[in-house]
């Protein structure tokens, strides 16, 4: 069932506002497009590498935001060179995709060609306990950015780009 | 003497700020208190379940996960405290989740 875009926009606006307050501490450069229901964030890894996150909020919060990485020059979304590489499968090289239940693109459902998980209940995304981890605190814009930034900050978790 | 004793007591206290995705926690701790004590207090105040494998890092050095048994006093060398102000430590409460 489709969510009124104005409802999704209200959720997005409130959550992006909280993230904008936190942004200076993490060096996030926030570029929300509320009309298009899109948020672009430039994030920086511990070694200075930049990543350009794209969040899309269609039907939010009935379903999670679609979270991806974008090449700011070509505007190609989901390219391997735009993705961080991690120690585990959070930044999943199969896809590539941010493999977390807070990301619409992780679900293997129609329209999500890089999705990997048929085993997750999308209707319960904000309270998911997949992989024995409580994803609820990270089911907001700020929470998602917080989780991704924690990985980019740590040399043992962030291993460079998936492709050059 | 009392004035000196009070001054010593004040010097023992550290102003602590913990930032999380759930908000900010601010309190005072002693130099001998541990990172674990701060994590526990902040998580309780911020309503975050400690079972979520929380880790504390200094905001100025977010790449280094702090050992829970580390004392706050030993972390002050990371900060360039103003001598006229109470010592202050700013932490970020993080978790990395499970890669799936």
Image (cartoon, grey):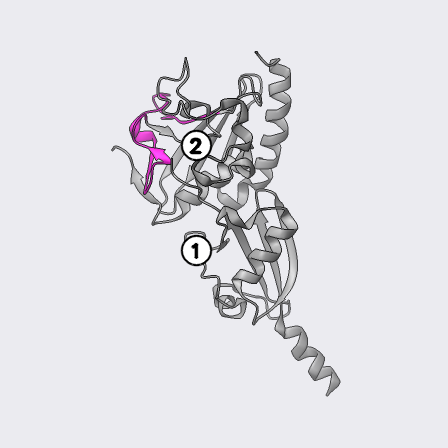
Q: Which residue is mark 1?
A: B65
In the rendered image, residue B97, in percent from the top left (x then y), is placed at: 44, 42
The CA span between labels 2 and 1 is 22 Å
Q: Spot the residue most to the left.
A: A164
In the rendered image, residue B63, in percent from the top left (x then y), is placed at: 41, 52
Q: Is residue A68 magenta?
A: yes
**Residue A56 visible at all:** no
Q: Nearer the viewer, mark 2 or mark 1?
A: 2
In the image: residue B100, left or right of residue B26: left
Element under disc 1: loop
Q: Is residue B76 magenta?
A: no
Q: The residue marked by circle 1 belongs to what chain?
A: B
| Image mark for residue A100 | 2
Secondary structure mostly seen in the magenta stretch: loop
In the image: residue A147, left or right of residue B19: left
- B76, above or below B40, in the image: below
The boundaries of the magenta stretch are A66-95
Q: Residue at x 49, y 66 (%)?
A: B75
In the rendered image, residue A74, in percent from the top left (x then y), is placed at: 34, 21
In the rendered image, residue A23, in percent from the top left (x then y), is placed at: 54, 40
């Amino acid at each position: 069932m489709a969510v009124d875009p104005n409802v999704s926009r209200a959720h997005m606006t409130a959550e992006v506002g909280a993230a904008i307050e936190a942004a200076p501490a993490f060096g996030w450069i926030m570029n929300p497009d509320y009309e298009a229901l899109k948020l672009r964030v430039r994030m920086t890894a511990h070694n200075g590498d930049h990543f350009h996150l794209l969040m899309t909020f269609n039907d939010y919060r009935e379903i999670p935001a679609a979270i991806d990485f974008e090449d700011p020059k070509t505007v190609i979304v989901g390219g391997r060179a735009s993705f961080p590489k991690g120690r585990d499968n959070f930044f999943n090289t199969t896809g590539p995709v941010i493999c977390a239940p807070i990301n619409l693109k992780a679900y293997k459902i129609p329209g999500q060609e890089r999705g990997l998980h048929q085993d997750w209940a999308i209707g319960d995304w904000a309270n998911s306990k997949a992989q024995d981890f409580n994803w609820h605190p990270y089911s907001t814009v700020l929470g998602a950015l917080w989780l991704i930034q924690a990985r980019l900050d740590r040399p043992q978790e962030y291993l460079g780009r998936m492709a050059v | 003497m009392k004035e000196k004793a009070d001054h010593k007591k004040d010097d023992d206290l550290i102003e602590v700020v913990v930032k999380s995705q759930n908000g900010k926690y601010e309190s005072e701790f002693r130099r001998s208190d541990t990172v674990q004590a701060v994590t526990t207090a902040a998580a309780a105040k911020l309503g975050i379940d400690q079972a979520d494998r929380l880790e504390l890092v200094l905001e100025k050095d977010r790449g280094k996960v702090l050992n829970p048994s580390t004392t706050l006093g030993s972390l002050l060398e990371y900060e360039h405290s103003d001598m006229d102000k109470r010592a202050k430590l700013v932490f970020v409460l993080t978790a990395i989740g499970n890669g799936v």
